[in-house]
Amino acid sequence: MSDTSILLHGGVNISNATKIKLLNQGTFGCVFRPNIGCDSKVGDKNFISKVQRKKSVSNRETQISEKIKKIKHYNDYFAPILNTCKISLAKISENEIKKCDFIKKKAPMFANKMRYVGNKTLMEYLESILEEKPSIKFFSKFFDCYLHLLTAIQLLIKQNIVHNDIKENNILYDDKRHCPILIDYGLSYDTTTLTTSNSLESAFYVYGYDYVYWSFETAMISFITNKVGVNWNEKISEDIIQQVVQDFIGHNPIFQEIIDKDETKDFEHSLTNYMKSFHDKTYQETIEELLRYAPTYDNYALAITFLYCIYDLKLHKHIENFPHISHMIHFYKSIILAMPNKRIDSIEAETHFNSIIYNFDDAAQKKE
């Protein structure tokens, strides 16, 4: 990004100190800093704007943000939308704005104002403290991040919220607060609102069998909402169940990249047996049953996220010096490979993970 570009607002030059920069471009919008105010003027560098067209996704993110802002000390865990307004970019001539592919100068856009957390993702933060090899200090920070995010999930559950898109680059490290912040609620949903076919189709908007952070339940529900049609009172067939099982295991990257063949085979066998209990259920009953485990969906995604961190940072190659790494891998896999009705929630995950930390601290003290 050029440091010499100048923002023109109504033909008046704005200083370089206040120019807008494109921070990120995603499926549903572009993020700019400083924020763009409701008067279409440049705002404060402590805030950002997610600029997007008005869609159901942006509406939902605003609604979820309102619930998050009711959480005590929410800024320690989240960066919700602070306000939303319609803006016009017609008066703004700026190279950074042009980099946002979907923006059309004359089309109305909506800006969601949010607190600027920083630009260091979870992985970038962990890489920055890893240095050349793992250390006791590194693992202490690793543990802190995971436990902090488990607390964030617990706070969302109390508000009946499923984040639904927890992944490494939706977790930013806040250097001011010294903790990870969970961002981007564009795919989030309130479980209490999933009472109609329209609300379910909105939440499960695409057949998500191959998205690594989504559990089998999401794959199954999203198949029904996208592939079955309107008659959810029909009984689900064994062939349909087997198709979703095969799609999920055959195309979900976790089974190609980290979970080994024996583990995958055992998981497929267990999942096939588990789903036999659904053979007499209707599509509607299947959705209702699988939604019972919605409080564990984000815990599943967080386990995937941290398991990838372990392998991407090559921590698994240091098991000889830090045996607890193997316990962490086993712990995360146990969440990922559990059947929906056996998967632990974030509170149970915190208890189990604290036992790993206790054993790690005990071993570290004996080394000293």
Image (spheres, rainbow, N blue to C red):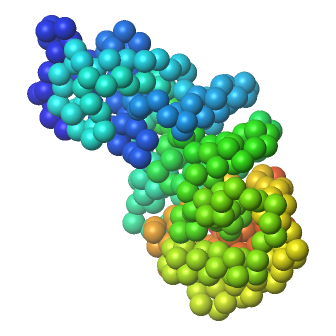
From the viewer's perspective, tell me whether residue 226 is left or right of residue 72: left
Does any portion of residue 146 appear in the rendered image? no
Where does the image place residue 109, in percent across and percent down from the top left? 38, 25
Residue 265 visible from this viewpoint: yes
Residue at screen point 41% across, 32% down: 52
Q: Viewed as shown, does residue 57 lie left or right of 109? A: right
**Quarter of the image holding residue 142?**
bottom right
Residue 252, x across and y down, in percent? 54, 73
State which quarter of the image contains the N terminus: top left
User: Would you say 181 lies left or right of 86 here?
Assistant: right
> Based on the displayed image, in which of its 4 quarters is residue 288 positioned?
bottom right
Between residue 214 and residue 105, name the one nearer to us: 105
Residue 337 versus residue 125 in the image, above or below:
below
Quadrant where the C terminus is found in the figure: bottom right
Q: Residue at x 22, y 14 (%)?
A: 91
Looking at this view, is 205 or 119 the one in front?
205
Residue at x 58%, y 68% (from the top left corner): 209
Residue found at x 62% / y 45%? 202
Q: Position of residue 127 (x, y in %)?
A: 43, 57
How many badges with numbers are in the image? 0
Q: Which residue in the rendered view is the most extreme toward the left?
A: 4
- Residue 320 percent location from the top left of the image: 57, 82
Closest to the observer, 199 or 189: 199
Q: Is residue 52 left or right of residue 196?
A: left
Q: Is residue 351 above or below residue 121?
A: below
